[in-house]
Amino acid sequence: MTHKFSRLTVLILISILALGFYLRWESVSRTEVIKPLRADAGQYFMYAYNLRHKHTYSHQGLNTEIPDSQVKPDAMRSPGYPLFLSLFVDGLPDGKMLNRIQFWQALISTATILLTFLLFQKLLPPLWALGVSLLTALSPHLIVSNSYLLTETLFCFLLVMVGWLMVLFFKRQSLWLGTVIGCAIGIATLVRPSLQFFSIGLVLFLLFHYGWKMGSRYAAVILIGFAFAFLPWIGRNMVTLGIATDQRLAINFLHHGMYPDFM
């Protein structure tokens, strides 16, 4: 269901986007994060720092006595979010650097609101799509997450983008658009690997929905797009480390999950 946007729809959408950005900027500018580079955030930062300044993908901490010392490459975390952070990590961490990152995360989160509208206006009347966008703008989780150097903001944006592209694809099938969808899924997987098996389910659905002849063509271009975005990471790991992926985080997660009420 596609609708032409009236002036009123556009005006309301702009107002929702402005409200969403205001709430996000107020949150990041007024929130004081204690030890903003602790735990996962610290590892993401060190990956970005080492990648930009030492040209090595590693979460090894900075040696303050020998700043130019070499670091050992690893693959414990996927590179999507550290690559984003590397755009801003032009030196040692300080308040200005963290503020720039938070500002851009607030912008990305606002862009997620726009993508949400573009997605749902293909499925619902404009008023309902605006309602979904407003709920997205007011979501406390999406507002607060921008204050932290974690993957949530970027991954949510990419996930909604994948959904929007898929709606476009099912409205009007295109091999080129299928390739773009595959690339988007691959990039999102580099941010959070939990999406890595989504392509398999999507391929099976395409084969079921469009039949073997057309479904296999669409599935092929999506897999090609996914491979184009994701396989360089696997190739780097094989060449540098001799392994495809580092399973330490997954093993640690499963191990701790074995203990009920574990604190």
Image: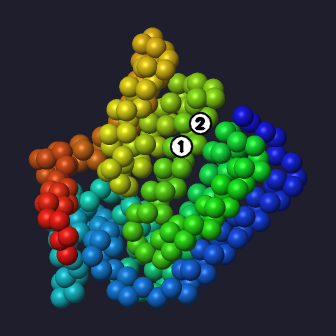
Q: Residue at x 18, y 45 (%)?
A: 244
Whether residue 116 is visible here, answered yes or no, is yes
**Quadrant of the rendering where the C terminus is positioned:** bottom left
Residue underneath mark 1 = 163
Residue 44's image quarter? bottom left
Residues at badges 1 and 2 in contact (C-beta under 8 Å)?
A: yes
Label 1, residues with CA under 10 Å away: few <14, some 14-19, many ≥20: some
Q: Position of residue 85 (x, y in %)?
A: 41, 67
Amino acid marked by disc 1: Gly
Measured in 3D between alpha carbons, the distance from the residue under mark 1 to the one under mark 2, in whole angstroms, is 6 Å
Q: How many marks on residues?
A: 2
Decide if residue 193 is on the left or right side of residue 106: left
Residue behind mark 2: 167
**Disc 1 on helix, strand or loop?**
helix
Task: State the image coordinates of residue 136 (x, y, percent, origin top left).
Answer: 61, 61
User: Is disc 2 placed on a helix, strand or loop?
Assistant: helix
Q: Is residue 258 left or right of residue 159?
A: left
In percent of width and height, residue 122 lies at 68, 39
Query: Farthest residue in the top direction?
Result: 213
Q: Tell me the quarter of the picture where residue 51 sits.
A: bottom left
Image-quadrant location for residue 25:
bottom right
Q: Which mark is residue 250?
A: none
Query: Closest to the observer: 105 or 23?
Result: 23
The amino acid sitting under disc 2 is Val
Q: Please tell me which residue is depicted at 38% across the width and 88% down the height of the picture.
A: 34
Residue 19, placed above or below residue 93: above
